[in-house]
Amino acid sequence: MRGLLEELFDAHPGELPYLVHDGQVVSRAEVRSAVAEEAKVFGGFGIGDGSTVLVQVPPSRTQVEVVFALWSLGAQVMLVDHRLAPAEVDALRSLCRPEFTVRAMAGGRFAMAFQPAYEVVTKHHRDGERATTEHRLIQFSSGSTGQPKVIGRTPVSLAAEVERFARIDGMPRVGERLLLLSSTAHSFGLIAGLLHSLVAGVAVVFTRRLSARDVLTTAEEHDVHVIFGTPFHYELLTTAKSVPALPSLRAAVSGGELMSDGLAEAFLERFGFRLGDSYGTTETGVIAMDVSGTSRPAVGPAAPGIVVRVNHGELEVELPDGTPYLFESKSRGAVSDHLVADRYSAGWLRTYDRAEQDEHGAIRLLGRSDSLVVIGGLKVDLIEVESVLRQHPRITDVVVIHAESIEAYVAAAEDGPAAGELAGWCRDRLAAYKVPRLIRVLPELPRTSNGKLIRRTQALREAVSQPS
């Protein structure tokens, strides 16, 4: 991974700006120097080639420098979202057994937007295990059993994706400024945002605060050319009271979740150009992308080097170099063999996205075929939420659905827990964005004639309104 980083930094002169935030412009050379200093600190802890390090630092210059420094030492970085609850992080650590954790310290809640710096603490774990594969980026995704899937990316895989982005029409180019709203802890923000910008000579601009006014003010102040964000960010921008003159802005791309036609139309009406699409998975990286947005309602053709097929109505992606899933023995609670085989088999990854392709190869997404939903660009598996609620000792049944938000319907005896208690139970065990917005406690849940729990929203809401 250190070789890839060196290639990215060497692609353009060091004086070119790289990170821009809150009036401060940091050059490529300054970031490179800071990364080298961070690497010395981590080296002092004994971190080196093959070390495994769990990193939980919010999007910030500190996060960028920490991840790059660890990669420069040859470490395997397990990147964890800063919003995860302590119990979730403990479960991941138990599953993967990193040798070290690097986490941010904060007196209060972490900021929503990118920050200049956080104080970090590094901790060594005596029971940690070294990397046994060439994977140097480890990410986690919700699984259909509630157990996270451990997803690995090799330096070769990451280099190929950076090259893939470079070949996509309309991507930011040398000398341009990219306003990055997508999280740098997730694939799109990290690879399309940070890594591609490094090799392309692009300045990555971050907003001070996550409001429509601040985002547009930042875009105006820095005369940005391209914006990367999630549907949540663009919905926010369409609510702005006024839009400043943005003479250089030529593209905005939405990634992380499926964008609605209504949002695409609202953005076009407000900003005068189409909102582009980027579609991918943690396992594969980018699958399809159309910066111009002219492919809608499709998300665009398969990205260069990506081979896809539609099998029984679901999109599959060819991954000939082997499974992206890393797991250990079942006794340690890792993802089981048959579940991994259900996702990846004979060189093909099953995305669980229903899709179709037109005669030109453009991919149109039709929704999910499993329990995974996306909340503000963050993936939530409803089965994981159900699993947490089922652990409560006074619950007999539970169904979790996604309508306008996550809703939980639980069955409990007369002395069962109240909705407030269950919300607290979830907050102690789940990241805040996974906690159901609505929890209803019922004597029993509706079932079909053959005894299966009903998961239809209307039937569940009608059960609430029926007299007990």
Image (spheres, rainbow, N blue to C red):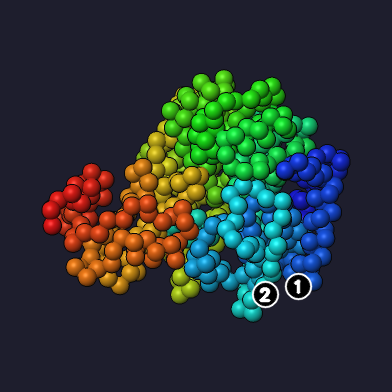
> Where 56 falls versus 352 (above or below)?
below
Mark 2 secondary-structure assignment: strand
Crowding near the residue tagged with mark 1, few <14, some 14–19, many ≥20 C-alpha atoms within 10 Å: few
- In the displayed structure image, the side of residue 403 where residue 116 appears, left or right: right
Point out the image quarter for the C terminus: bottom left
Counting residues from the N terminus, which is met first, the one under dot 1 or under dot 2?
Answer: 1
Q: Is residue 371 visible?
A: no
On the image, the x and y values in percent for residue 109 come to: 57, 58
Disc ID at residue 45: 1
- In the displayed structure image, the side of residue 311 where residue 123 appears, left or right: right
On the image, the x and y values in percent for residue 427 come to: 43, 62
Amino acid carrying label 1: it is Phe
Report the Cα–Cα distance between label 1 and label 2. Answer: 8 Å
Point out the image quarter for the N terminus: bottom right
Amino acid carrying label 2: it is His
On the image, the x and y values in percent for residue 118 come to: 69, 58
> In front: 338, or 57?
57
**Residue occupying the point 49% across, 68% down:** 87
Q: Is residue 373 visible?
A: yes
> Where 240 falls versus 210 (above or below)?
above
Disc ID at residue 124: 2
**Residue occupying the point 72% across, 43% down:** 22
Q: Quadrant of residue 342?
A: bottom left
Q: Are marks 1 and 2 in contact (CB under 8 Å)?
A: yes
> Where 320 falls versus 174 (above or below)?
below
Question: How many dots with numbers?
Answer: 2
